[in-house]
Amino acid sequence: MKLIRLTTVPLSLQFLIKGQPRFMSKCFEVLCVSSGPKAELDQVAVNEGVKVKDIDMTRQITPLSDLLSLVKLICLFRKQKPTIVHTHTPKAGILGMLAANLAGVPIRLHTVAGLPLMETKGVKRKILDAVEKLTYTCATKVYSNSKGLEKFILKNNYAKADKVKVIANGSSNGIDTSHFDPENYNQQQNHALRQQLGMQQKDFVFTFVGRLVGDKGINELVKAFSVISKQSLVTSHESLATKNQSPVTNHKLLLVGPYESELDPLLPETLVEINSNPNIISVGFQEDVRPYFSISDALAFPSYREGFPNVVMQAGAMGLPSIVSDINGCNEIIENGKNGIIVPAKVGTSPSKALQNDLQQAMLKLMQDQDLYQELKSNARDMITSRYEQQLVWEALLEEYERLLVNSD
């Protein structure tokens, strides 16, 4: 039987569901479909050992391009005759579910891993609401990757309760905890990378991993860190004034991820601060984020909205406590005071002064309260390995496929 996995961009195949196509290929003939670039899709084929197909899709609202993509998908599904089409990401979801429905695919599945419309208002929000409802109407089953997201879907009447489900304990792909393991990195490696990035061994390093955009709370995070830096600098000057020494700051903010200036640009003052503050280090997109987690002391992840963030699970598996906002997914992975600190989510317009202040307090708390920090750190990895091990998530999804196949006969 054929299984088609569809995402808007190849990056989602490479990271969002990495390893799943190969695992499912033991039971299905798997085809992964996404837009280009072709080189990235070809890499998916090599990594996963499955066939791939390039069909252009955009991430924006582009009616003419979307119609052409829809037609191409209908033709593909009619030719391939898959038993299951399983989509991820919003644009691939609406196009893939609509095309699969029109092509007569019997099992049509869509995973919801976050809803951009949560931060949208007015006419655009109404359009996105309608698109979401149409996606779920065309699907035979909808998988929210967090319980909070499931509640949001049902509250907004996007689908009926019997159509929506959370696989295992949540997450789209779980975590390979043997891959994300601090034991894979020794003290020498960590020392060398810190030195390379201009960090002292005594520096307390807060790390953010993800897209550097407004919706991830980067404006508030950078501002909060900037205020802490200035306060520490003043304190350092005062304490060292009589010793004829230069002030030394003892914390850093490490930003790991790409900018997306065309979709969700950061404020100009945020970019200025990132580029001018010597204690903020931006290393851009990194294919392997583990070395950066390994030299970090805590994850700072004040996102406005999420489905079930891999980054928070990855950081936890690497033994890091996290500061997260009180949103879907984050507040399921992190238990306040046990493996991290949860700060109130952004309310109202952005950037949020309240979120900035809460982040400042949480960051200072982790740096100043060593007993609390060590407690959170000691729990971090165990709380991931016991709930989100990747193999468990894959097996639960395969069981779901098998159940649907039996019921469709």
Image (cartoon, rainbow, N blue to C red):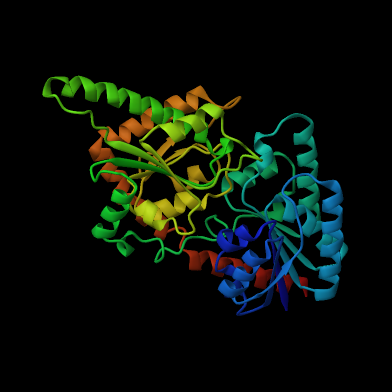
From the top left corner, tell me how far across and down residue 369 is, in percent.
26, 34
Relative to residue 263, is residue 55 depicted above or below? below
The quadrant of the picture occupied by the N terminus is bottom right
Name the residue located 76 percent from the left edge and 73 percent from the top edge: 83
Name the residue located 49 percent from the left edge and 68 percent from the top edge: 391
- Residue 344 visible in the picture: no
From the top left corner, tell me how far across and down residue 329 is, in percent.
53, 46
State how many labels appear: 0
Q: Quadrant of residue 360?
A: top left
From the top left corner, tell me how far across and down residue 246 is, in percent.
20, 28
Instruction: In this rendered view, identify the residue nearer to me: 375 or 157.
Output: 375
Instruction: In this rendered view, identify the residue nearer to me: 126 or 75.
Output: 75
Instruction: In this rendered view, identify the residue nearer to me: 135 or 275.
Output: 275
Name the residue located 23 percent from the left edge and 39 percent from the top edge: 371
The quadrant of the picture occupied by the C terminus is bottom right
Relative to residue 104, is residue 91 depicted above or below? above
Residue projecting furthest to the left:
243
Is residue 155 left or right of 230 when viewed as pictured? right
Q: Quadrant of residue 54?
A: bottom right
Is residue 319 left or right of 77 when viewed as pictured? left
Relative to residue 155, is residue 270 depicted above or below? above
